[in-house]
Image (spheres, rainbow, N blue to C red):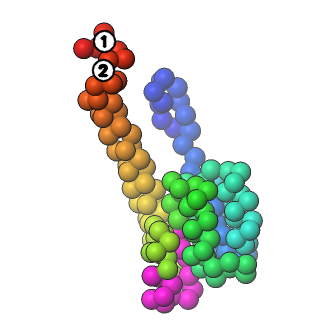
Amino acid sequence: MILNAKGRLINLIINALIVDDDKEIRKILGLILENEGYSVETAENGKKAILLCEKVPFDVALVDIELPDIKGTELLHKLKKIQPKMVKIIITGHPSIENAARSVNEKADGYILKPFNAEQLLEMVKKLIEEKKNEYLQMFSEVERAKQNTPIFKYQHPENW
């Protein structure tokens, strides 16, 4: 819980999406994230992941590279269009230079190998979410600074001259 700009307490729940065709992997990842306080949704294929992303804002998505209906790297591209601010992490049991290159090209924020270490996974997720948050906070502060230094905004508020 933190205070918002109006002094009200708000609860910061991080929404996570897990996309993997393996039910056990979805369950394990879900438990790991839920134990850390994340709200978790799961999808067994790309189609369901896209439908969920059209309805729910997610902070992070863990996407298997091999899905029954679409390559995980192709799904990254589609998810980026729907939710550009979401952190996207590829999970794979089939590491290859080709998979890694495709993941980078489709703007994956992270790349995790199966079997994964829970602590390392959580560390990566937290780090990437924090980096994305800081990136957007910096962008907003730069916009505000630009407004203050742009004459058109000053003319709209002569009392601030």
Q: Give the x, y percent position of residue 128.
A: 43, 60
Q: Is residue 76 above or below residue 148?
A: below
Label 2, on which residue? 154
- Which of these two is toward me, 8 or 86? 86
Q: Is residue 26 visible?
A: no
CA neighbours of label 2 inside 10 A, class few (<14), some (14 to 19), many (20+): some
Q: Give the x, y percent position of residue 139.
A: 37, 44
Magenta span has 136? no
| Residue at horizontal 46 percent and vertical 82 percent from the top | 100
Q: Is residue 25 above or below residue 97?
A: above
Q: Tell whether 13 sits left or right of 7.
A: right
Residue at far top of view = 159
Residue 158: give its label: 1
Q: Is residue 94 visible?
A: yes
Quadrant of the rendered image containing residue 92: bottom right
Residue 144: give its label: none
| C-beta proximity under 8 Å, tags 2 and 1 | yes
Q: CA distance from mark 2 to mark 1?
A: 6 Å
Q: Is residue 122 above or below residue 57?
A: below
The three-letter code of the residue at mark 2 reads: Lys
Quadrant (top left, top right, bottom left, bottom right) of the C terminus: top left
The three-letter code of the residue at mark 1 reads: Pro
Q: Give the x, y percent position of residue 66.
A: 64, 82
Q: Tell whether 137 sits left or right of 64.
A: left
User: For the residue labelled by badge 1, is the local secondary structure a helix, a strand or a loop?
Assistant: helix
Q: Which segment is the magenta one?
A: 89-101
| Residue at horizontal 28 percent and vertical 25 percent from the top | 151
Q: Give the x, y percent position of residue 77.
A: 57, 68
- Which of these two is toward me, 121 or 21? 21
Quadrant of the rendered image containing residue 156: top left
User: For the residue labelled by badge 2, is the local secondary structure a helix, a strand or a loop?
Assistant: helix
